[in-house]
Image (spheres, grey):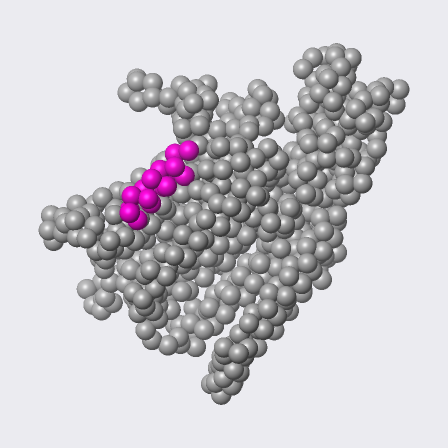
Amino acid sequence: MQVFVALLLGAVGQLFLVSVVVLELGIFIFGTALFLSVKKRLTLASFRDTFKLEERLTKAEILIITSILLAAIILVVKLATEVIINYDSLWYHLPTMARWYQEGKFVSLDEFSRTGEWATDAIAYYPFNWEILCTLFVMPFREDFLVTLPNLISWFILGLSVYLLSTKVGAERIYSIAAAALVLTIPLIIQHVNSLHIDLPFAAFFLTSLYFAISYSQNRSFVDLSSFFIAIFMLLGIKLSSIGYAVLPITIFLFLEIRNTFLYKVSFKDVLNQSRLAIPTIVVSILGALFIGFYWYLKNFIEAGNPLGDIKISLAGVLLSPGSMELSTLQQTSLANLFHFTDLSHWKIMVLQAIVRLQVPFLALVFQALLLPKLLLPKQRFTYAPLLFSLCCFVLVGTGYLYWKTPFTGTNLLPPLPPQPINQYIGQQARFAMPFMGMLGVIAAVTASSLRTSSYLVAAVVFVSSLLGIVSSTVFDIIRVSTAFRGGVGWASAILDGFRSNPTTAVDQLLKIVSSNLINVLIYILIYVIAFVLLVWGASRSRVNRILAAKASQLFNRPNRFAIISILLGLLVITSWGAREARDIHRKEVYGGVYEYIAGNLKPTETLGYLLSYRSYFFYGKHWEQKVLYVPSRSESLSQWVDDLKQQQVSGVAVGPLEEKMGWQPREVRWLENPAGHFTLVFGQDPKKEPTIYRLQNGQGG
């Protein structure tokens, strides 16, 4: 619904706070009226049945849930108090969102459409459903305080999908909860919560669509059918590769529907006759889903004549979509094309990246899934749904195949490729395998159920995985900040890759970086362990539980309810203020003082030009108010460039930090640094290491 709101307003050029509030208010009133009309038919019975809550939670289950809830709380604190440091987020996700926020419509940024570099220009044709959703979370605060909160929601959705799919197939509740927890605490997945990468929500909606396809085949509920359509089209609006991935849940849906029709003689009319709301719900869901699923592809077709942007696709000699880049050329960058099973160095890179980035939870899931053949033993007494399990195995293989064939899983370079293109980059791109990781969790849950793996062993593995997941992501963030922000532009992955070539040096580098920030790591460990012990102790004391429940009941009785709610809202506001203050401190530590300089020395009406920077997001200011323009020189003439800047009313030019592929002394930098030239350095010192700003002499505001 929120994506629909943002897309609709952005499409008509009204993506502003006032318009959002008006439309949201209308939806709220309509939703409230709808709820009041059906609330008498809502019961907790279906909820308990869906989530398998008929029986009380066991101690082992409480341990597992406590572990994952503590991890979630720490993630909330991190996303609220720590700024985004992900490369792609700062390069194009956030700048695109900031420009939409300023313009109130979906404008294309010149820096992603006029560079002449295919990989950069292709960004303009990406589907941006998730980014537009995150933009809504900026509007109430006028800053990026909770911009990644939707990622935390998708993190929960991914876990719920793994759990519900596992129980549908027949896995026992404790193993389903554990599988979901292990998937969620894979360090690579945790790292993507406070990031604008869209792979986490992509995986979440992929598994959600599969769950609703199976659930609809069993319940024949119009709500499940509507939810299936919404999940599928949300998937399509998040990422281009969804076109391939969506085939899997759609295939499962059609297979089960055909099977039910011919085997059980079910009729679609029965679904439509379930309620007077069935037909309106299905129709509205499909129409809304079509809009959120196809909007970006239709926009691409109108602007470029190709729904996929600039990718050329041919089938049997027939041109399906025109473009300058062949799909077959892009596929040369996949693991399927580059990974050589006989090359030992490739295996070393793959294993090292799996150990470092995926760690205990992934290895535990793989180990459990490898015991799958035991399900076929004749003495097997475990009861499960063989058909659904087979379909889930099919999807597991399908997601693995799609990851293997997806472009850029083997290298970040376009053809022609160097002799040894595979590097540590495959570890970063393991994020493309998140749908596979989710399905691996489902298979592992079923296998563990059949083997009756010790529940307390499972709980211990989840505890260790959750703790290591938080610690690992914190350490990786520390390394990233140290290498890429305090030392210019660098890659934390290079240090990780050093464990393969020179482990001793890599360990020394890691210890040197982490030792200065050791207190941050220890704080998270202590908070996690102490909170875990207290919660487990409280949960194991029935008398304590009864006292707490009685006190809570007294506090929230009708006479006290308004006062308690008011107090809680006040605490929420105070906590929000404190978190924003902490985020400001972290922003200055990581980003430097560029925000403070812009706020104190530039007016929002002034135009700040920029070039040669993969962190243009910094130049929009804390409140996304600064007008920013991409201003590379279109000729070799300095005077022509200066005239162009003045004509565009540019008062200053921002550059840096530079990267090696830009060249360390491009012509614009030489012009800017010339002490006798047209520009004066007013912020920063070295464009090779940090963002710098130069004032244009005698320019607008100069």
**Residue depicted at x 50% and y 77%:** 558
**Image quarter hosting the C terminus:** top right
Residue 685 falls in which quadrant of the image?
Answer: top right
**Residue closest to the far right:** 676
Say if residue 392 shows up in the picture. no
**Residue depicted at x 65% and y 46%:** 143
Above/below status of 562 relative to 270: below
Q: Is residue 274 magenta?
A: no
**Residue depicted at x 78% and y 12%:** 639
Residue 636 falls in which quadrant of the image?
Answer: top right
For residue 686, side relative to residue 129 (left or right) = right
Residue range corresponding to the magenta coloring: 280-295
Q: Position of residue 361 (x, y in %)?
A: 47, 58
Q: Nearer the viewer, residue 171 or 202?
A: 202
Q: Is residue 286 magenta?
A: yes
Q: Position of residue 444 (x, y in %)?
A: 36, 59
**Residue closest to the far bottom:** 543
Q: Position of residue 176 (x, y in %)?
A: 37, 63
**Residue depicted at x 37% and y 50%:** 207
Q: Nearer the viewer, residue 261 or 649?
A: 649
Above/below status of 447 relative to 681: below
Look at the magenta stretch and give its main secondary structure.
Answer: helix
Above/below status of 296 relative to 278: above
Q: Nearer the viewer, residue 124 or 471?
A: 124
Q: Position of residue 345 (x, y in %)?
A: 51, 40
Say if residue 361 shows up in the picture. yes
